Image (cartoon, rainbow, N blue to C red):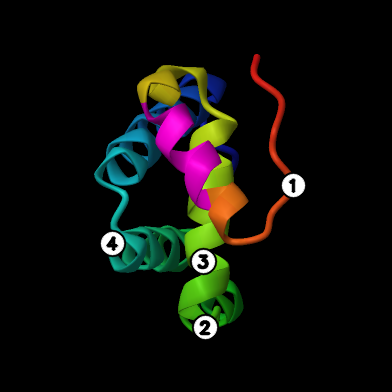
Amino acid sequence: MQRPRTNRREADESYVHAMGRVLRNRDVEALRRFLARSAQERDDPGEAAEIEGIPQADLESRMHKMIMARMDLQDLHDESRQWLIEHGFKPLRRR
């Protein structure tokens, strides 16, 4: 049986909000735990295991890219942009 659309939308909004809180803390291992727990809650143990296997440096770069993609974290963009540049990533254009 499908869940009502409003519950799905509420769940998506809750996930986005929670992800924002995790990203704001800029804690790579907290991000890993959040992503793995979310995969487990979706009953996707394969994805959870994959997340657990992402090397620390790769997940850290992904974290900074995720921060850059979110307008609600715009106050963190300069620091993440600088981190990305310092670690050899092409500078991202300002929005």
Q: Is residue 18 left or right of residue 89?
A: left
Q: In 3D space, how far apart are the residues under numbered discs 4 and 2 (Cα atoms)?
A: 15 Å
Residues 17 and 56: in front is 56
Mark 4 and mark 1: Cα distance apart in space: 26 Å
Is residue 43 something one can see in this rendering?
A: no
Name the disc covering residue 59, or none: 3
Is there a contact, CB below 8 Å, between mark 3 and mark 2? no
Kindly report the distance in space between the C-alpha atoms of the residues bearing marks 1 and 2: 29 Å
Say whether marks 1 and 2 touch (CB < 8 Å). no
Under mark 2, the amino acid is Ala
Q: Please, what is the three-letter code of the amino acid marked with disc 1?
A: Lys
- Name the quadrant containing residue 66: top right
Please give the label number shown on residue 90: 1
Q: Which residue is mark 2?
A: 49
Label 3 vs label 2: CA separation?
14 Å
Which mark, by number, is residue 30?
4
Sequence order check: which comes first, mark 3 or mark 4?
Answer: 4
Q: Secondary structure at mark 3?
A: helix
Q: First in sequence: mark 3 or mark 2?
A: 2
Q: Is residue 50 magenta?
A: no
